[in-house]
Image: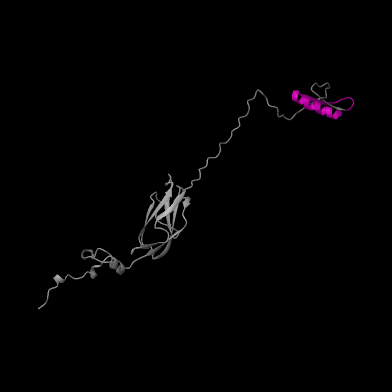
Amino acid sequence: MRALLLCLLFITQGALGQVYTYIDAEGNRVFTDKPRSSSAERVILAPTNNVDPAQPAPTVRVAPPAVTKPTVHYQVLRILVPEPDASIHDGAGDMIVTLNSEPGLLPEHSYRLRLDGEIQGEASRSPVFSLRHIDRGTHQLVAEIIDSAGLIVERTPAQPFHMHRMTLAQKRKINPCKKDEYGVRLECPLKDKPKDEASILPFF
């Protein structure tokens, strides 16, 4: 019980001022703020958690919440032309692809087109792409919207189409060559130009 009282005294005196300790005549260790013995030693106390009212409260800096870009979602991105499973008839294998998105293309976004997985030309804010010299057969188109960093924001499923490249003979059959088109249209070479009957003079 006495040891407990000494501890309480030690704590109390530590909060009020200087604390000293010494051994009394009965051999007991005494803690006090008023030493009565020349052999008393000052006790060095650890700093307490008491706040000095004269000192300003420390400033706590709270980091602002991180600002993240809102996720952009387009309601619709589709390939308008050609339609799915469309058949394209062109002797040179050329075609036009037209895209559409809802809402319209947002700032810093661009359209990009893939043919059979390969990027076609440069990304553009124009929804119209011109493709040339596509081989005969079935191909897959994919439309994408990308941001300024090149990250894909939206993309369509692969959409098939079928390219039918007509032969020159087939093109001549559909659109016969006119006299002034020989040497102009690819399917109308000069060597196939019929001779002018009036220019043929009889020999005697």
Of residues 158 and 1, which is closer to you in this image?
158
Name the residue at 83% across, 27% down.
6
Q: Position of residue 2 (x, y in %)?
A: 86, 28
Q: Residue furthest left?
A: 204
The reply to whether residue 173 is visible in this rendering is yes
Q: Determine whether 161 is above or below 63 in the image.
A: below
Q: Quadrant of residue 114?
A: bottom left
Q: Position of residue 100 (x, y in %)?
A: 41, 51
Q: Residue furthest right?
A: 26
| Residue 76 relative to residue 190: left or right | right
Q: Residue furthest bottom?
A: 204
What range of the chain is rendered magenta?
A: 1-27
| Residue 62 relative to residue 145: left or right | right
Q: Determine whether 148 is above or below 121 in the image.
A: above
Q: Quadrant of the N terminus?
A: top right
Query: Would you say residue 10 sits in the magenta stretch?
Result: yes
